[in-house]
Image (cartoon, grey):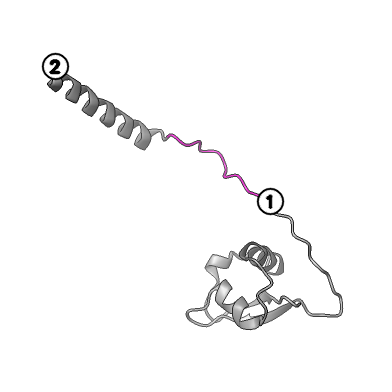
Amino acid sequence: MKRFIRVCVIMLILYVVAYDLKIGTLPQSSPANAEIHTEKKNDKNKQNFKTYEVTPGDTLISVVEELNSNKNYSIVSMLQDFKSLNPGVNPENIKIGKSYKFPLYHN
């Protein structure tokens, strides 16, 4: 009897793994995007970005931290601002030697 139960459990595990690999258990629709609304102060007199040429080892976060002395920004707002300043550019795929507009955050 114990051998029969073991075989059934092993068969069930194999079926679940095969089903998950073939069809999957998560829906294949487009990922849900969470919307976060933040207030942005638009000051026409101040420049809200700086053009910076990317060097080896630079990331969006490292460049923004280098350009801004204050830490009054979030990663989500940083990503949104970078994408709005550089349409069609993915922040994860910035290229060495190219210049991009990076957001500046004032007090």
Q: Quadrant of the C terminus?
A: bottom right
| Residue 72 lies in the magenta-colored region | no
Residue position for label 2: 1
Q: Main secondary structure of the magenta part?
A: loop
Label 1 crowding class (10 Å Cα cut-off): few <14, some 14-19, many 20+?
A: few
Q: Quarter of the image holding residue 47?
A: bottom right
Choose between 72 and 67: the one closer to the eye.
72
Residue plotted at (57% across, 42% down):
30
Residue position for label 1: 35
Residue plotted at (72% across, 75% down):
105
Report, in whole angstroms, how far the alpha carbon at label 2 lies from the one at label 1: 55 Å
Q: Residue furthest top?
A: 1
Q: Quarter of the image holding residue 42?
A: bottom right
Q: Nearer the viewer, mark 2 or mark 1?
A: 2
Kindly identify the amino acid type of the residue bearing the numbered disc 2: Met
Q: Is residue 29 left or right of residue 100?
A: left
Q: Position of residue 82 (x, y in %)?
A: 66, 68
Asked if 28 appears above or below 36 in the picture, the reply is above
Q: Which mark is residue 100?
A: none
Q: Quadrant of the N terminus?
A: top left
User: Which callout, 2 or 1, points at the residue further toward the start of the chain?
Assistant: 2
Q: Position of residue 35 (x, y in %)?
A: 68, 51
Label 2 crowding class (10 Å Cα cut-off): few <14, some 14-19, many 20+?
A: few
Asked if 80 appears above or below 56 in the picture, the reply is above
Q: Secondary structure at mark 2?
A: loop
Q: Position of residue 4 (x, y in %)?
A: 16, 19
Kindly identify the amino acid type of the residue bearing the numbered disc 1: Glu
Q: Quarter of the image holding residue 13?
A: top left
Q: Range of the magenta residues? A: 25-34
Q: Position of residue 16 (x, y in %)?
A: 33, 30
Q: Secondary structure at mark 1?
A: loop
